[in-house]
Image: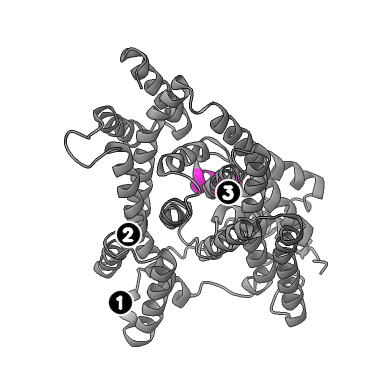
Amino acid sequence: MTQSPPETPPEKAANGPLPPEKPSFKEAFLFWLKLGFISFGGPAGQIGIMHHFLVDQKRWVSDSRFLHALNYCMLLPGPEAQQLATYLGWLMHGVKGGLVAGILFVLPSVFLLLGLSMVYVSFGQIPWVSALFYGLKPAVVAIVVLALLKIAGKSLKSWFHYTIAAASFVAIFFLQVPFPLIILVTLALAFALQKLHPSFLEEKAGDTTAHANEEAYYLNAHSVVVGAGFNLVRSATRALVTLVLWALPLVLFYFLTRQFSFWSTLITFFTKAALITFGGAYAVLPYVAQVTVEKLGWLSKYEMIDGLALGETTPGPLIMVLAFVGFMAGFHQYGGSLAMGALGLFTTTFYTFLPCFFFILAGAPIIEKTRDNGTVKAVLGVVTAAVVGVILNLTVYFGKAVLFPEQVSLAGLEVFSLVWIIISFVAMYRFKIGMIPWIAVSALAGLGYYLAMGGVS
């Protein structure tokens, strides 16, 4: 399973500087560690940080190679930024490089979220702490609205995409069709149309301008990665290792706990969630909320919104919100035990990201032998359009909970929440105020409103 490093031509670049030396494992390790602590701003911000450092500053990876890896990571379920880090780590230092890059991308956020979750359940019922979250909730709704607009702007490229998005919203909001089923039906429809009416899925050709001076980078379009391509034994071995790692905690829970049914349900659910997370965390959250809140009762819808607020304040992928759900599940299942909440958080994290490592470490060698695949991109474009409808459902779900906590009526409307949603949207969309600073402002606004109302929450 040892992965050889890529081989780059040693000769001097024809029209530019010499390519840099291969980055040492220590150099790469320190960058991935730093990235884990500064990766705020969602996938766009995280990918931007990686591009600035790896492409612009260090010239370890050329722009074309970086974008090639990113394109395929965006087609996979799971957080694309974390998978991109794993992919690039693998390109530079093989399997150990991919593991280090992927693990360090999420490790700081795991412990930060664990600490915040413990503080939340320990002190969240104190009036002034509740007031802080009272201001956070409408800000989170505005953040989700912004995410919806951003994703819709990039994904809805034709009347057909708009139709798919609308149908997806109707299916999940009015008919309560499960998110996994929506994805499966959309995939089937897209593949059928690709065969019968490919014109439905056509998109404008992107900019194919060649990237100049590829030789100025350590990894470039001409670099050869030893071991690239399909290898049955290697792929089977990595699949077997993944299955063993998946089964091991399940076996331990069977022999070491009296509540195996709870842990088996948690493991099965979050494995399924990890495998259907197309379109990022915002796409899968409605499904997670629908099952964990409405069916399993692991947490309340207000705790779910608070968890999203906590997830937005930590570095790392937003899908870490699922770890908060796992914490609350273990915490409530064991009568308010912080230790079992922590075990729930670590278990959820493990099963959320295990498929990501398999997809990259088993799939990257195959992906390296491919170039832009128009058919696959067109099909996944239809899936992304369906995801827009799902995110609209999330927006309505959270908006209803924040604006009408008791009943959907004019008398039940939370005026402060409505006003603060509008202010938050204008602040972040029109004036480009950063998400993290605005979350802090919103928390203080909630506290200020609490004090202005005489300390009555």
Q: Are marks 2 and 3 in contact (CB under 8 Å)?
A: no
SS type, badge 2: helix
Region in magenta: 42-52
Amino acid at circle 1: Phe
**Residue tagged by mark 2?**
389
Amino acid at circle 3: Gly
The residue that appears at 41% across and 24% down in the rendered structure is 131
Mark 3 vs mark 1, foreground winner is 3
Separation of marks 3 and 1 at Cα, in angstroms = 41 Å
**Residue tagged by mark 3?**
326
Q: Residues within 10 Å of mark 3 (few under 14, many from 20)?
A: many
Q: Which mark is residue 320?
A: none
SS type, badge 3: helix
Amino acid at circle 2: Gly
Picture quadrant where residue 98 is located: bottom right
Q: Earlier in the sequence, mark 3 or mark 1?
A: 1
Q: Are marks 1 and 2 in contact (CB under 8 Å)?
A: no
